[in-house]
Image: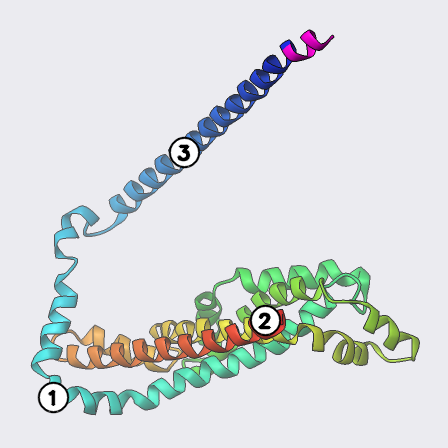
Amino acid sequence: MADISIGGAPQSVGGVQSSYMAQVQRRRLYGGLTLLIFVILMVSGFNIADDRNAGGFWEGLHQIGDYPADVLSEAWEKRADLPGLIAKYFPALVETINIAAVSTLIGVAGGIVLSLLGTRGLAKWPRLIPLFRRISDIMRAVPEIVIALVLIFVLGGGPVPAMIAIAIHTAGALGKMFSEVAENADLKPVEGLESTGATWTQRMLLGVLPQVAPNYISYSLLRFEINIRASAILGFVGAGGIGYELRNAMAWGPGRFDEAAAIFILLFGTIVFFDQVSSRYRNRLTEGQGQ
């Protein structure tokens, strides 16, 4: 019996090894096929886009650095005017930040409501959980620029359509993330408050939000960074802010490239500043929650 067990051990180890190698080869094959399909789709899609492009990508590839070079050269020639231009466009930057801040606050409020109404174990109307989740999906599925274009057609150009568009998208995105956080909340405080006769709103405010507040604030700060960039981009479609000024400066062409450079400096510095501040506070919240 001892000989059989000893003799059979190498066979079992060899069988496991061969099975493992077969799985590895199968995974490599599937991975290679997936990569090949991806490359084929990317190349074919690029060729279709290149055929429909008026200028052609490959023909204009050697000119890709001409525009940045023109902007930088003109900005360098007029570098003495940059401080004055930065001061000139600073109010437009403040408008962009205001758009991002207001839309973030509105979106956070909407995201909290959607998350609590769409979380199992916390929802006020459990049967309507799928409805609130689909509403959240739709709100974050539509890009801000699409919503802004529709609102600009209805309301006219300005910061209001941008605020509404970013707030809608923010509420949908944060509703999803907030819901995932709320699902991990401890239900014992909620049950204790319910036993004392507390309303649903009181249970959420006193039993759930104190637990999830660090994560909610962290996600809100991250979303504020994103909304600053989004509000600048929406300016290109007439939604106001510094993006609108950048579009005008770029559309004018040579002669106003120094203004475009000043706006780029303002926008880049603002995004970097808020990114660093937000990251610092988010790290503090995460570390404090871990402790």
Read off the magenta span: 1-6
Task: Kindly identify the amino acid type of the residue bearing the numbered disc 2.
Answer: Ala
In this rendering, the label closer to the viewer, 1 or 2:
1
Q: Earlier in the sequence, mark 1 or mark 2?
A: 1
Task: Kindly identify the amino acid type of the residue bearing the numbered disc 1.
Answer: Ala
Q: Earlier in the sequence, mark 3 or mark 2?
A: 3
Q: Foreground residue, 46 or 251?
A: 46
Q: Give how far apart the Cα atoms at labels 1 and 2 are.
A: 43 Å
Q: Give how far apart the Cα atoms at labels 3 and 2 are.
A: 36 Å
Q: Vertically, is 15 above or below 133?
A: above
Residue 87 pos. (x, y %):
26, 92
Identified at 54% across, 60% down, the residue is 141
In this figure, which residue is indicated by the disc labeled 3? 37
CB under 8 Å between discs 3 and 2: no
In this figure, which residue is indicated by the disc labeled 2? 171
Question: In terms of image quadrants, where is residue 239?
Answer: bottom left
Q: Vertically, is 51 above or below 120?
A: above
Residue 97 appears in view: yes
Which residue sits furthest left?
77
In this figure, which residue is indicated by the disc labeled 1? 80
Residue 165 appears in view: no
Task: Kindly identify the amino acid type of the residue bearing the numbered disc 3.
Answer: Ile
Element at label 3: helix
